[in-house]
Amino acid sequence: MDTQWIVTEIDGKVASIATDYRHLPHIGAELAGLPAEETASVGTRKISTEELVEFAAFLSWEDLRLFGTPFQLKVWKTLFELPRRLYSYTELAELVDNPQGVRAVAHAVALNPVAYVIPCHLVIPKESLDREAQIQALAQKTLFKGEDLYLLDSLDVGAYAYGRDLKRALIKLQLAQ
């Protein structure tokens, strides 16, 4: 995977990780509303996916400088702190104490400004998660107990800001660790 990621940092804290500059207007608007003395430096740099994986491994929530509504921040922090596995939007809505707010959770996930670090790519449609569980249950009856099956390519992983192929690749990469 030869994807280049643009890391935007404010005073040494990560504000955005994306394959393009899509988050910069929002970050700029947020910074424009702050007193000048609250921000000393803003910068961007490009890193490879391999560097992103290494970089993300050492980041804590406190290393992030995120701009979002209180609800978005709650969704992002919950997702950041969860064990790395696949989740459904429904499951995530329950985890943020808003079981009726699946669409609101999906919207917050879609606006995640810190790709890979906050693993929005691990959230997939409930139907796909249910299908995976059914296939795994049937696979347990096979000789290899399903260890020979790789199901991700046959599942609908849902939408992703950077495309479904990259979402699949990031899921494979993160779940392999």
Image (spheres, rainbow, N blue to C red):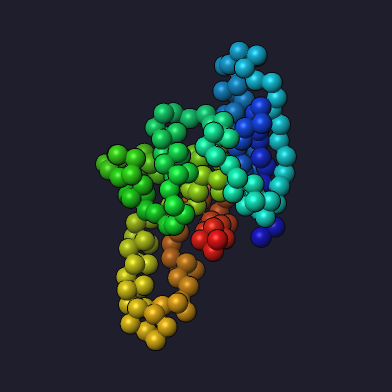
Q: Residue 133: in sight, yes or no? A: yes
Q: Residue shown at 66%/60% (left/top)?
A: 1
Relative image position of residue 15 (x, y in whole percent):
59, 34
Question: How many dots with numbers?
Answer: 0
- Residue 32, compared with residue 8, is above or below; it is above
Q: Residue shown at 67%/55% (left/top)?
A: 50
Relative image position of residue 126 (x, y in whole percent):
34, 56
| Residue 115 location, quadrant | top right
Q: Residue 108: in sight, yes or no? A: no
- Residue 48, compared with residue 43, is above or below; it is below
Relative image position of residue 157 (x, y in whole percent):
45, 59
Name of the residue lying farthest toward the bottom: 143
Relative image position of residue 61 (x, y in whole percent):
52, 37
Give 46 or 142, whichever is nearer the viewer: 142
| Residue 33 location, quadrant | top right
Q: Residue shown at 71%/35% (left/top)?
A: 44
**As drawn, is 33 to the left or to the right of 109?**
right
User: In which quadrant will I find the C terminus?
Assistant: bottom right
